[in-house]
Amino acid sequence: MNLPPLLEGRLIRRYKRFLADVELADGRIVTAHTPNTGSMTGLTRPGSHVWLRDSGNPKRKYPLSWILVEARPGVIVGIDTGMANLLVREAIEAGTIDTLQGYDNIRSEVRYGRERSRIDLLLEDGPKHRCWIEVKNVTLVEGDTACFPDAATERGRKHLRELAHIVESGERGVIFFCVQRGDAERLRPADHIDPAYGKTLRQVVGQGVEAMAWRASVTPREIRLDTALPVEL
């Protein structure tokens, strides 16, 4: 995915979950929307190098959105959770993810399940050949291990249960971890943050839900999924 020209700056602070104050390269201080509801552990240090996207919409209260941050020298992280679905869809359509090929159609945000959910991506090749994919954006890396979630998530456990019901009905269900940074070599559930999520993940994988993780190469010009990671349970 190619990115539009971004504004560079230094993070002053993140607050109220959805807001961040940033000093731009020209000295202006702006408030940007933060499209990430997680804790963003390790990504909110004051002074961090950040990149903002301008929506071009002057009617928005916060026309700028915080998109990237340099977590450590040379490691740029994509924080926009909404971008994860687009990255996975792009990689499927490009044929990058070979285990998700063989479908004629992709739909987004399809209602499904016993708990009134919306699936991120639905792959279809006729009514009897379908694959339901729940995408999770991953930004936390400890050492060389990507960890999810970065905060306790009942909603995330609900999505796992929904996928288990899908598999029980005879269709494919996939939990897909989109790691928007290039320094991870594996993915593990963050049991030290949300042990209930890790327990549920292991349970549903045992019931046939497929767990996949892919790492992205991230620069201020583009983000692309390019490397499969082992999921260690």
Image (tube, rainbow, N blue to C red):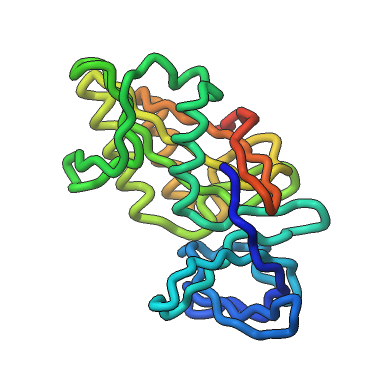
Q: Give the residue drawn at x 74%, y 67%.
A: 49
- Which quadrant is home to the N terminus? top right
Q: Is residue 154 above or below residue 199?
A: below
Which residue corresponds to the image point at 58% horizontal and 34% vertical from the top-left? Answer: 214
57, 34: nearer the viewer: 57
- Place residue 126 in its image quadrant: top left
Q: Residue at x 39, y 33 (%)?
A: 203
Q: Position of residue 4 (x, y in %)?
A: 59, 55
Image x and y of residue 5, in percent: 64, 58
Q: Residue furthest right?
A: 73
In the image, taking residue 43 as reference, residue 36 lies left or right, namely left
Q: Where is residue 94 drawn, in percent x and y?
A: 51, 26
Choose between 63 and 37: the one closer to the eye. 63
Q: Is residue 126 above or below residue 93?
A: above
**Depth check: 3 or 48 in front?**
3
In the figure, is residue 183 to the left or right of 201? right
Image height of 199 relative to 192, above or below: above
Q: Residue at x 65, y 85 (%)?
A: 29
The count of marks equals: 0
**Which image quarter holds the C terminus?**
top right
Q: Whole-percent x and y of residue 163?
A: 31, 34
Judging depth in this view, the residue of 63 and 134 nearest the camera is 63
